[in-house]
Amino acid sequence: MYSENYSEYEIIDAHAHIFPHKIADAATVNIGNFYDLPMHSSGSSERLVEHGNEVGVKMYLVCSTATSPHQVNAINKFIAKECEKYPSFFGLGTLHPDSDKIDDELADIKNFGLHGIKIHPDFQKFAMDSKQAYKIYERIEGDLPILIHCGDSRYKFSSPKMVATIHRDFPKMKIIAAHFGGYSQWDEAAQYVAGLDNVRVDTSSSTKFLGKQKTKKMIETYGIENCFFGSDFPMWDQKSELDRLFELNLTHEQYQKIFAENFKSFFNIHKVK
Ligand SMILES: [Zn+2]
């Protein structure tokens, strides 16, 4: 529908998942079941790029989370390898708070050239504001940014209120609070996450549920400069997520901020490859 718009923008997908080929189909089915949502695609790198190319995505933040400590190393290696293969990939590593090798894993993440950490408290089964999770924040504050899956009214692991708590305790930690700060808890997110320094949100897995008016309101509440466009691929594809954002009738400048500028300044990226 809005196809004429895409080429006018530099587009960065700030939230995409990739899985190794062998498990891509199964992993995708698993997330689908977890959220009780149909998946848009299988979560492989090839598919991600295929879909992104439809709308000219220039860069993808890619990540994957370890559901147990022993997966951490393999996942970080996989993400690093995919980033080598695909120059448009901007990789985040994963950590697990139950690991007794967090320092080593963090050193690997840096050596691999990854740009931050992704955690998903609901999948990983720890509370975002728990003592064990603080072992991660203590080590990355003022250093590596962290993308955190936020919100799920069915669980008590990742609520928007917890984002406010960890921000209070680690004010210098750069946080991306995914899904407008709280999937399925958007009102609470607007209340607790909006206005926090060093905290950004992404638009992923939200617009379909929020609808046009509420999405616009969320962006206003957080401020244009604090929002990143993200698809949460393979949950959704970039085109349908972008089309829903285009319905909001923001200005070209506002879209460009959400699509790329805000992300680049958050990660100090000067030039997109
Ligand atoms: Zn995610």
Image: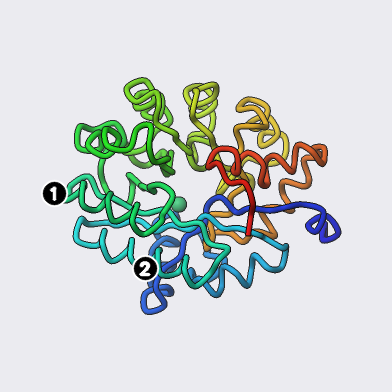
Q: Residues within 10 Å of mark 1 (few under 14, many from 20)?
A: few
| Apparent side of residue 5 relative to residue 186 in the rendered image (left or right) | right
Decide if ligand 1 comes within 8 Å of the CB at mark 1.
no
- Near-viewer residue (195 or 173): 173
Which residue is labeled 1 in the image? 100
Residue 185 drawn above or below residue 13: above
> Which quarter of the image is occupied by the N terminus?
bottom right
Q: Residue furthest right?
A: 4
> Which quarter of the image is occupied by the C terminus?
bottom right
- Near-viewer residue (75 or 77): 77
Residue 267 drawn above or below residue 9: above
Which residue is labeled 2 in the image? 78
Residue at point 62%, 46% (across, down):
270
- Mark positioned earlier in the residue sequence (1 or 2): 2
Q: Amino acid at mark 1?
A: Asp
Q: Residue furthest bottom?
A: 22
Residue at point 53%, 42% (across, down):
267
Residue at point 33%, 61% (across, down):
76
Give how far across and how far down residue 155 sits, in percent.
34, 41
Q: Residues within 10 Å of mark 2 (few under 14, many from 20)?
A: some
- Near-viewer residue (131 or 137): 137
**How many numbered circles are shown?**
2
Disc 1 and disc 2: Cα gap in Å? Answer: 21 Å
Decide if ligand 1 comes within 8 Å of the CB at mark 2.
no
Residue at point 36%, 47% (across, down):
119
| Apparent side of residue 39 relative to residue 56 in the rendered image (left or right) | left
